[in-house]
Amino acid sequence: MTILLYLAIGLSIGLVSGAVGIGGGVLLLPALIRLCGKSPREAAGTSLAILIPPIGLPAAWKYYSEGHIDLEMVLWIAGAFAVGGYFGAIITLRHYLPDSWLRLLFGLLMIYIAMRFIVGSASESANAVAGLVAALFAWLGYWGLRTVGRRHLPRPDLGSHIRTKHEQGHGDIDYHI
């Protein structure tokens, strides 16, 4: 069953990656975290290892054979990408950023990219959708922060307070609120 899950993830994300050129990580990271139970660090490392053979070879070769690759650009960006990827891995693996921050940064980056694509459209309907999506995110953000805030508020322990007062010799406590 696990192998079927892996095959389904690979086939579906590979199809989308080959069609729109997103590189796979946009979909692969959340899939590895949510469907396979990987930590953000495991998902990042696994995603990088997964993307080397299938994306780096057959899909790129197809685009190259159709004349849609600028080799000079590829060499410069790939070299810088390798250096950046190496130092990014150091930052992540040495736990300079906790898992919660990695998830938050990834999510915010995806929201930013999505909004740039939507707002960058010349269509009025797309701009209207962008406004509605922004309003929805604002509403969800408000309720999410409210929920998180409530979880971290200390609950009053009145029983402990009353016991402490009794132990201090204040037996005449008014229990009415």
Image (cartoon, helix red, strand yellow):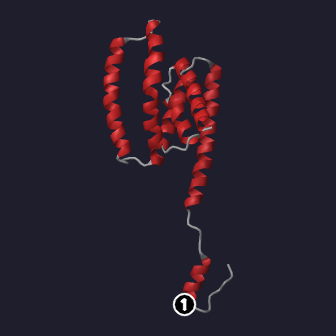
Above or below, 82 against 41 in this view is above
Residue in front for this viewpoint, 48 or 157: 48
> What's the residue at 52%, 90% (across, down)?
168
Residue 119 percent location from the top left of the image: 56, 24
> What's the residue at 51%, 43% (across, down)?
38
Picture quarter with the C terminus? bottom right
Residue farthest right in this picture: 176
64 left or right of 140? left
48 left or right of 8? left
Above or below, 163 against 98 in this view is below
Task: Report the residue marked by disc 1.
Answer: 167
> What's the residue at 31%, 23% (across, down)?
79
> What's the residue at 64%, 27% (across, down)?
129
**In what element is the residue under mark 1?**
helix
Query: What type is the residue that disc 1 sits on?
Result: Glu
Residue 59 percent location from the top left of the image: 48, 17
Above or below, 165 against 117 in this view is below
- Residue 119 in view: no
Q: Which image quarter: residue 125?
A: top right
Picture quarter with the N terminus? top right
Q: How crowded is mark 1: few (under 14 residues within 10 Å), some or many (20 or more)?
A: few
Q: Which image quarter: residue 71?
A: top left
Residue in front for this viewpoint, 90 or 122: 90
How many circles with numbers are drawn on the protein?
1
Residue in front for this viewpoint, 117 or 48: 48
- Residue 74 in view: yes
Residue 159 percent location from the top left of the image: 61, 80
Residue 160 percent location from the top left of the image: 58, 80
Above or below, 50 against 160 in this view is above
